Amino acid sequence: MRQDAELLDTRLDTRLGTRLAELRAERGWSLGDLAERSGISRSTLSRAERAEISPTASTLNRLCAVYGRTMSRLLSEVEADDEPVPLLRAADQPVWADRASGFVRRSVSPPHPGLRGELVEGRLAAGADIAYDRPPVPGLEQHIWVLEGALEVTAGETAHRLETGDCLRLRVWGPTRFRCAGDAETRYALAVVLP
């Protein structure tokens, strides 16, 4: 079973790398152009496009900001079939993991043409701390509902501590940070609505 999961991760990394290369080519950018726009080194970009590495959540967020996409939209472009289905069974919901940071992301309700919202389940391992230097789309609306554990969300200069059952609503214009604020894993639902 573990080998199957690793094989699926490898396939997803390969499709993600291909899609990142396509997005760059569509704009006629060199790796240097993209490095300048994203603040990510050319070597890291090259290795991600060739699927030699799996990008971290922070790296993907920077690329999404450059390409004007949410992370869910980018991942749905490499995970989804040609036609989105209205009902996604739990077993069919795409899962992506940033193994380096201890972040697991389940796309419960992935982006869909004609809809502005999506629903994500996030899991942060104890001690996990993810910082995003900018939103993928300025003014992105987020509703963060903690299902289990404790979560600290910092938006700009303001830190919010959320306990089980708490919900934080905000529009994201600048840097954000998600930190597991307890001794155990934190699980939360994130509703994302495009402006």
Image: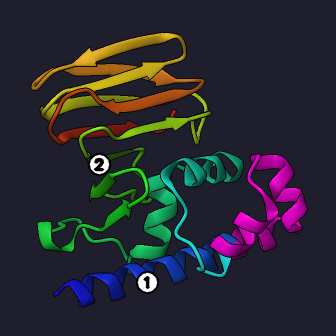
- Residue of label 2: 120
Percent of width and height locating residue 149: 13, 32
Report helix, strand or loop for mark 1: helix
Percent of width and height locating residue 32: 89, 61
Q: Nearer the viewer, residue 18 or 45?
A: 45
Q: Nearer the viewer, residue 56 or 67?
A: 56
Residue 66 to residue 52: above or below: above
Q: Is residue 43 magenta?
A: yes
Number of numbered markers: 2
Q: Is residue 129 left or right of residue 29?
A: left
Q: Residues within 10 Å of mark 1 (few under 14, many from 20)?
A: some
Q: Is residue 164 left or right of residue 8?
A: left
Q: Quadrant of the N terminus?
A: bottom left
Q: Is residue 29 magenta?
A: yes
Instruction: Give the amino acid at mark 1.
Output: Thr
Observer able to see residue 184: yes
Report helix, strand or loop for mark 2: strand
Percent of width and height locating residue 28: 88, 68
Observer able to see residue 82: no
Percent of width and height locating residue 92: 20, 73
Residue 141 to residue 113: above or below: above
- Residue of label 1: 10
Query: Which residue: 18% across, 42% down?
Result: 185
Query: Which residue: 14% across, 38% down?
Result: 184
| Magenta span | 21-48
